[in-house]
Image (cartoon, helix red, strand yellow):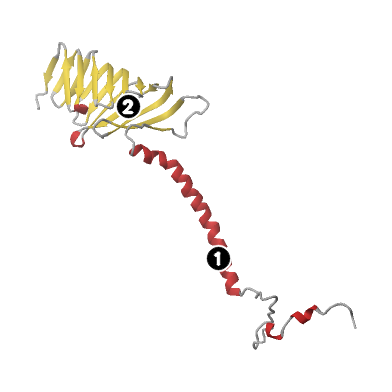
Amino acid sequence: MSAVPDRFNHLRRADVDETSNAPFRALWRGRRMPSALLLARRRLLVVWLKRLLPLAALSLLSLVVLWPEYATLHDPARVSYRISTGTDASSQGSMTKAHYRGIDDTGRPYTLTAEQAVQTDADTVVLTKPAGDMTMKGGSWVMVQSRAGLYHARVQNLDLKDHVTLYRDDGTSVRTSHALVDMKAGTAIGHEKVNADGPFGTLDAQGFSMTDRGTQLHFMGQSKLVLDGGS
């Protein structure tokens, strides 16, 4: 007789699948080999996990990117900064295709864009070809633009110079060489010579002021008005 114990005695007769025409399947220590259906389900689960995990990662990344936009809409005191893909990151404090968004004292939004913005200190941004627009009462709008300007972030003032143009959606256009725009209050003022035209005709003046987010336009100093005969 061999001294080696017969370990096959641990197999019980009941552990053998003796169903007719079924493949031989043994039970070992109470564990059963997974069926073909269970294996197929596991493979399907793995396939779905491979697809869902990248989607979950993309969703998380989108949330990180979009969260500042959401926070801006719920925080009127904050101004958002967008930088296009063409930004030259080598120039610190400078961005191209700058886009600023803010909220005025009455809760209306305003936007300010520039082809280039260079931040010189914590409060001042030098702008190239700035353009700003504000929404007036009733849904009308007014926009201002120039070739150069400064944006003072703390007080939200826009100091425009060099071919300054103010345009209202009713067709009124005001042109001057310098203007100071308060984006938060929705006002503007200029003390240089002004040329204006619109549905009323044409007008030359020594200065202008805009109040109530463009609803009211006032012209100062010696003025010359030529009425449009068709009005």
View extreme (right): residue: 1
Residue 187 x %, y %: 23, 24
Q: Residues within 10 Å of mark 1 (few under 14, many from 20)?
A: few
Quick one: 124 or 28, which is closer to the camera? 28
Quick one: 206 or 126, which is closer to the camera? 126
View extreme (bottom): residue: 20
Work out whether mark 2 precedes mark 1 in sequence or the reverse, and give the earlier one.
1
Query: Residue at horizontal 47%, vertical 35%?
Result: 85
C-alpha separation, residue under disc 2 versus residue under disc 1: 55 Å
The kind of secondary structure element at disc 2 is strand
Query: Residue at horizontal 66%, vertical 76%?
Result: 30
Q: Is residue 40 above or below residue 57?
A: below
The kind of secondary structure element at disc 1 is helix
Name the residue type under label 2: Ala
Task: Judge left or right: residue 11 versus residue 194.
Answer: right
The numbered mark at residue 44 is 1
The numbered mark at residue 78 is none
Task: Judge left or right: residue 8 versus residue 99.
Answer: right
Q: Quadrant of residue 136?
A: top left
- Between disc 2 and disc 1, the foreground one is 1
